[in-house]
Image (spheres, rainbow, N blue to C red):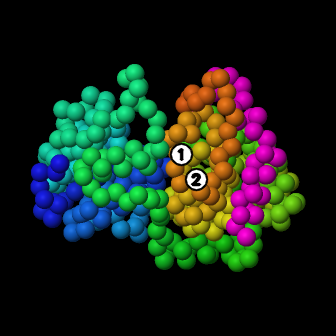
Amino acid sequence: MIEKPVNHIDTLIIRCPNWVGDIVMAIPALDCFRDSFPRTKIIGIVKKNAQGILRDGPWFDGFIDCDDKSWAGFWRITEQIRDYKADMAVLLSNSVRSALSVWLGGVRNIYGYRRNFRGIFLKGGPEPIRNNYRIVPMPTTEYYLGICRWLGLNVPEKVQPRLFIGQQILERAESLFQKYGIRENDLVIGLNPGASFGVSKCWPPEHFAELAELCEKELGAKFLLLSGPGEEPIAQAVLKKSRADIINTYDDKVDLEMLKPLVQRCNLLITNDTGPRHYAVALDIPVVVILGPTNPDYTAANLDRTIVIRKEMDCSPCHKKICPREHQCMTEITAAEVFTAAKKLLKEQK
């Protein structure tokens, strides 16, 4: 379906998703594009703070900072796209704005999902699956691979995200582990109590605190408390409410690139339904996911080493950032339930 032969596409621009988890779930599609265009210069449009997720991987030859919330940022992106004189662009994001910036950047062979009234800018792409005009939820990884399949690219039967960690980042991480007193044979459990989406995704801090106490008492585990920008109050609440000895990584300003080796060092990650859960999958780390207001169909892939704990409510999945009710979908999940799932996954490692 591509007019130019694959070998004649000199430059390809890929607009990546914005959310951390979506970027990781898009990696099998990025693998597909790199395998299909081995000699092509591939440029990723990625939020600056998220580029570390993809750094050291084989997918991109360069990045354009995705800062298009202001008109000034939008035009900067457009000008940079124009400088590359790209033959083709692929949109993994769904917005009209992402299509417009690439089109104004001079790219005419633009492919992506035909939705949100942006078809005027696209050369082609699949229609999302709908039922009574509503888009049917599906695993996000498969959603992105749908573009690859539409383009006639070869998609392997088994796909799983993967992340790469550079030597410099590994050395910095090792210095942190020494600072934290984490030794090679220690059982390390990562705790991720925040979620940039909103508080509705967050399991209560007192539940994380109780869980840490159970794991410390019965498993002798050490804990890495992971938190991102704006999540310090949640991290502090966990520390304040727990008697367990928890290592708080917040002061070390762990960014999305440094988060990779920290998750990789964990024997188990316990997290809300947010970006680090997808790091764990990509790094083959067992993960317990506490899922509340979001639809599990979007992440129903590569669950071999994942246990998802969820309470079905008459209002779920609502996808609201702030719960208008009493947040029972999260508060009714107990520390004991999560602890049981954690022990199960750790036992399976042995």
Instruction: Please say whether residue 13 is one of the residues in the magenta stretch.
Output: no
Q: Dividing the image into 4 quarters, which one contains the C terminus?
A: bottom right
Q: Residue 8: x percent and y percent?
A: 12, 62
From the viewer's side, name the closer residue of 191 and 250: 191
Label 2 belongs to which residue? 303
- Residue at (57, 64) in percent of width and height: 284
Magenta residues span: 321-350
Q: Quadrant of residue 94?
A: top left
Q: Secondary structure at mark 1?
A: loop
Question: Is disc 1 surrounded by few (<14), some (14 to 19) or many (20+) residues within 10 Å?
Answer: some
Q: Residue 194: x percent and y percent?
A: 63, 45
Q: Secondary structure at mark 2?
A: loop
What amino acid type is highlighted by mark number 1?
A: Ala
Q: Quadrant of residue 96?
A: top left
For this view, does 347 lie left or right of residue 308? Answer: right
For this view, does 260 lie left or right of residue 128? Answer: right
Instruction: Please say whether residue 332 is one of the residues in the magenta stretch.
Output: yes
Q: Residue 35: x percent and y percent?
A: 30, 65
For this view, does 148 lie left or right of residue 135? Answer: left
Q: Is residue 146 above or below residue 171?
A: above
- Residue at (38, 60) in percent of width and height: 156
**Is residue 30 at least partly visible in the picture?**
no
Between the residue at mark 1 and the residue at mark 2, the CA separation in whole angstroms equals 7 Å
For residue 313, the mark is: none
Q: Is residue 263 above or below residue 274?
A: below
Which residue is outermost to the front? Answer: 157
**Is residue 333 at least partly visible in the picture?**
yes
Q: Is residue 176 above or below residue 8?
A: below
Q: Is residue 223 above or below residue 323?
A: below
What amino acid type is highlighted by mark number 2?
A: Leu
Label 1 belongs to which residue? 300
Q: Mark 1 and 2 residues: CB-CB less than 8 Å, in contact?
A: yes
